[in-house]
Structures are given as C-alpha cells and as structure tokens.
Amino acid sequence: SYFIFLFFQQRIEIHKLRQGDNLILGFSIGGGIDQDPTQNPFSEDKTDKGIYVTRVTEGGPAEVAGLQIGDKIMQVNGWDMTMVTHDQARKRLTKRNEEVVRLLVTRQSLQKAVQQSMMS
Amino acid sequence: KIESLKVTVDFLKVPLGLKKPPLKEALAAIPGPGRTKPLGLERHKPRRSDTMDNESQYSGYSYKSGHSRSSRKHRDRRDRHRSKSRDGSRGDKSVTIQAPGEPLLDNESTRGDERDDNWGETTTVVTGTSEHSISHDDITRITKDMEDSAHLDCSRHLGVSLAGALALLAFLTPLAFMLLPQLLWREELEPCGTPCEGLFISVAFKLLILLLGSWALFFRRPKAFFPRVFVFRALLMVLVFLLVVSYWLFYGVRILDSRDRNYQGVVQYAVSLVDALLFVHYLAVVLLELRQLQPQFTLKAVRSADGASRFYNVGHLSIQRAAVWILENYYHDFPVYNPALLNLPKSVLSKKMSGFKVYSLGEENTTNNSTGQSRAVIAAAARRRDNSHNEYYYEEAEHERRVRKRRARLVVAVEEAFTHIKRLQEEDQKNPREIMDPREAAQAIFASMARAMQKYLRTTKQQPYHTMESILQHLEFCITHDMTPKAFLERYLTAGPTIQYHKDRWLAKQWTLVSEEPVTNGLKDGVVFVLKRQDFSLVVSTKKIPFFKLSEEFVDPKSHKFVMRLQSETSV
C-alpha cells in the first residue's frame, strides 16, 4: 500500500452578516507564522503555521456556507493565507468594503476519506 | 590471607590437539639436579621440608618454590606440580586435597612414569578421557597443568635468572670500575680530593635510587604466565646488556690496559654509567608502565554461554597482556557462570520435543523422499513453535512469581532471626554462660532461617554455590561487623562475581588464549581473540576509541532571552 497525499480543496463562499456597525463571518481563526504551531489541535503536521478554523458559530454565515471546524484556509479572495501572520489573516477576512469572501479551504476529513477509498 | 590470582595462559594448540614433542624432549633433557637456582632477586624462601603444610607460602612464588626442590627426583617434580595445581594443598608427597576425583590422581601419577617413554600413548589416553565427568576433567586439567607449567617454569625460570644476572652485573659494574684501579695500581694514582668524594657520594645515592626503582618496577609477583616472551622486557634487557658490555670494553682498553692515572676520570666514567642506567630505568618505566595507561581501545568481552558482556577501556597492550587484563576484570565484573540457568524450563522444551516426535511418526509413512520429509518436519516444527513461546512466557512468569514469594519469605525470616541477638553492651550484666562468640551466635540464629534460605537457593538454582558451612561463616562475618539483615542477604539475592565464591569455582588455570594473530602483537582495531575455558569462552573484540574533534562555542551570558508563546484565537 502506498500513500498519496491529495489536498482536496473546497471553495466556500460566505456572505457577511451585518451586526450593528460590523460585518461578521461567524467563525474564529487560529494560527499564523508568528504563532506556535504545536498548539494547533487541528493540524496534522505540527509545524504547519497556516490559518485554521477553530470555532464556527451556530447558525452563522460560515456554518450556512459549509465551513467546518478544523478547516485550513488557503486563500481568501485570491490572497494567499498560508504564510501570513495572525493579524494579517484577521485583516484580510474583515475588510470593510467586502461583503462576500470566497475561501479556499482544505479539510482533513476529506483527505482521510480519499485515502481509505484508495486503499480498499 | 590474600592469595593472588594465578592464570596460566597457554599456547594456541595445534589443531590435532597434540602437544609439541619438543616440549617433552626439553623437559627430559634438563637434568633435575642441574637446574640453577635463581639469583637472590626475589625474597629467598626457606627450603620447605616434606612435612610442611603451610598455606601462606602459596601464590606467586610457588613456581619458585617448585624449583627449589628441583634437585629431587623427576617424580617429586610431578607430585609438586600436581599439588601446586590444587589450591590449598602444600604437602610434598602427601596430597591432602578434598576435591572429588582424588583417588584417580594416583592412577594418573603412575601413568606418568610411562609418559616420557611412550608419549604418543599418553596423549591418546588423555584425549580419550575427556568426557564430562568431574574426575576425568580433573585428569585432563592436571595433565595440562603439569605439562604446561613444567615448560613454562623452564622458560620463566630462564628468563628471570637471566634478568637477575644482568641486573646484578649492571649494579656491580660501577663499583668495580671504581675499585679496580685502587686495587691494582694504587700507588701510581693521582690523589683526588673533594671532587672525587663528591662523585662517590653521588654514585652511592644514584645506585641506591636505582636499586629502589628497580625493586619497585621489576620485583613484583608475577600475576600471570604469558605464553610468549614479553617484548619490551626483552628489549630492555638487550639494551642494558649492550650498555654494560660497551662500557666494559672501553674500560678494559682505555683504563686497565694503559693503567690510567687520572682517578677522577675513572670515577667520572663510573658515574656516567650509573647515569645511563638511570635513564634506562626511566625508559623502562615509560615502556612498561606509562604507555598503556592512556586508553586507546575499547574491548568488548562477551561470554559465550549466556551472553553476559562488558566493555573495558585499555591502552596500547599486546594481545596477551590484554587477555590477562580482561581475565582480571572478568573475575570481579561478570556474574558467576551458572550452567543450571542456561536451559529453557524443561516443561517447555519437552513439549516441543514430544510434539516433534509425534509429527514425524505420522509423516514417515506417507512420504518417500527423505529430504522432503525432513523439510516438512522442520516446517511443522516451526509452526509448532508458535505455541511453545506461549508456554515459555507463562512458565517464566510463574517462575518469577515463585522466586519473589520465596525471596519474601527469606527476607522476613532473616529479619526476624537478626532480632534475636544483640551486641553485648558494657553495662549489661550477664552471666558468662549466656555470652556467645560470633560463631555461636551465628549457629543460634541460623536454624530459624535455614529452611527459607535453602528453599530460596533451590528455586534460584544457586544451591551448589553455597554450602551450609559457607552460609554460617558469612553469617558469623556479618554479625561480627554489625551488618543488617539486608547486608547479609546481599550475597544471596543476586548472583555475584566469580571471585566471591570458593576457589574451586575459579578454575583460574584453565584458560586458553585463542588468537589468529601472534599474541605478542599489539592491539589494533578489529582484533578478535577468544579466551577459552572448558565450559564456555569469552569472545573479546577490539574497537578503537573514536577520535574526538571538540569544537568550541562561546555563549554570551547576556544572550539568553525569551518570549511568550503565542496561541491567539480571533473571531471574525
């Protein structure tokens, strides 16, 4: 048996929700190149300093759009998110003039499903 | 009393197992009475009479004492060798040994009479009796000892006497140089005042220093018999010989012949010889003692019987010296060799074997091809082994449990026994009948722990190593020195090194050095040699200590700075 790591990526389109003066997406992020990657419970590789979804608010725009906890965000509206600091990531997600964000995410559960189907 | 450890290291035997004939001829050729006594280098031992049975004279000098009786008959020499090979017996003709197999010694000694005539016949007899019974082992061992020690004594004797003669000559030569002019042409000598006196004093002290230094360096009990000549010592002897001879040559030509009048010159000549001898002594110290101190090689010694292994660091040594070093360390590092512990528990093995038999009986009828059948049997046995490891595991666990239980009982029994006695204090008023000496005290408390001790020793298969007498003696020893029960038990709970047990277990004379390279070669990386004994062998392999390249890194004490680890979570 052999292992091929396929990064199945999913595109998720989130429409921001207006709450008072803010536009919220309804999830929390963790990670960044200035953070400690070993504390990340969602990453498979503990040296991965990417941005991960750590919480998804119930009923929020992210959950509606299909974002799941543990997803790794690769791109936001075309901006790369794999080599950014935590604050840069936050800024890219919370631009005031954008109402829709298109995320490119990778999901581990997808990877595992592919592996299992390949091996059986 | 402390008895030194004597190790006889033999030649590599010719593969046929026969000893070289020249040995025997050499032995027969040397007349008994004609053997020269060694010059009085080592402390002169009094001649031992027949009836003397003094243990304290054993060890180290025994080969010397052996030769002090060389003037007697050939047969006496054999008797002496036989008694020498038995630790503890020092009688000459009467052999007082308690070891088993003693009655057979007389047979062996009578056979020895024919030994010199029919050497071949003797050899075959010896190899023929090498079955594994204790009495036959004794015969082979004693025969080997006798032959080898006779040969080695001869060469050792020769070497030591030669060295002694040379040393004496070198020591007396400066004195002779200074005395001869005084004796021969005293009237013609120029008077020589203060400078000569100063030189006399310096000669005296230098000779004294040389004497003390030689005593410290050379006059030591040999701890082992090496099979081959010690290269460095031979080298030094040759050097001293050449030095002395050349000095005598010049002295004879320049001074004696021409009757030199300048006495101060003669004395200075003698002083220069003493200086040269001191430098040779310095060279001896460096070659014999200092060179091997710095570790260069790591030797790994593995016991073939059960895999016990140790690592040792040694310096530049020849193979034979490294072998002796390993043996010295073997006796206090390796746990004692216990053949009873080597086998798998009988229940496991017998099941495996019986399974084997059952299968082959069934298969024999069906297959014709023998190789195919045997292969099938082996394959079947291999499959069967999958089950026997299970049994082995449970047997081991059970044994472990049993040992622990017995050990607990033993510890409790001993602790309790030790509470029954205490040391007599000055202020206690006891009548004399109640006061015991250590032996009686030991006997008094031994009864309560005897059974637990016996059961424990039996379970751990140590009972051949500890007799009741030895346990009592150890108990007496511990009581005398106020030891706790735990200290008393330390000897029995773990298998100790070989030197802790009775001398009969040592078998120090049975070692054989087996090596592919000549044994006087120095150690090199990758050299392997084997120290063989009858029941197992020590395989020693050499590895050079790696060359360490140490680099330096400077750390500024102010450079130690730290930051907090960030794990932020932001909601967007």
Image (cartoon, rainbow, N blue to C red):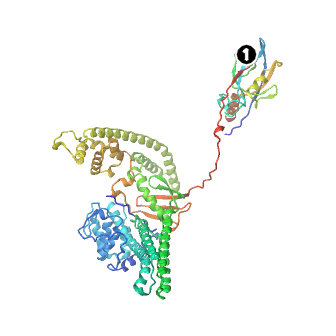
The correct choice, above or below, for B37 with respect to B445 in the image is below
Q: Residues within 10 Å of mark 1 (few under 14, many from 20)?
A: some
Quarter of the image for residue B393 reads top left
Q: Residue furthest top?
A: A20
- Provide residue B406's location: percent of width, then percent of height: 34, 40
Is any atom of residue B519 visible in this view? no
- To which residue does mark 1 refer? A60
Name the side, left or right, on which A75 lies relative to A30.
right
Name the side, left or right, on which B291 lies relative to B44.
right
The correct choice, above or below, for B271 with respect to B388 in the image is below
Is B464 in front, or is B9?
Answer: B9
The correct choice, above or below, for A29 with respect to B297 in the image is above
The correct choice, above or below, for B509 with respect to B415 in the image is below
Is any atom of residue A77 visible in this view? yes
- Provide residue A21's location: percent of width, then percent of height: 78, 12
Q: Residue furthest right?
A: A97
Name which residue lies at 51% across and 61% down.
B292
Check the picture and name the quadrant holding the N terminus of chain B: bottom left
Is B253 in front, or is A104?
Answer: B253
- Provide residue B52's location: percent of width, then percent of height: 24, 67
Q: Identify the chain of the residue marked 1, using the numbered disc in the image.
A: A
Q: Amino acid at mark 1?
A: Gly
Is A44 in front, or is B266?
Answer: B266
- Provide residue B527's location: percent of width, then percent of height: 54, 62
Is A105 in front, or is B50?
Answer: B50
Q: How many marks?
A: 1
Check the picture and name the quadrant holding the C terminus of chain B: top right
Identify the element where label 1 is drawn: loop
Name the side, left or right, on which B436 lies relative to B153.
left
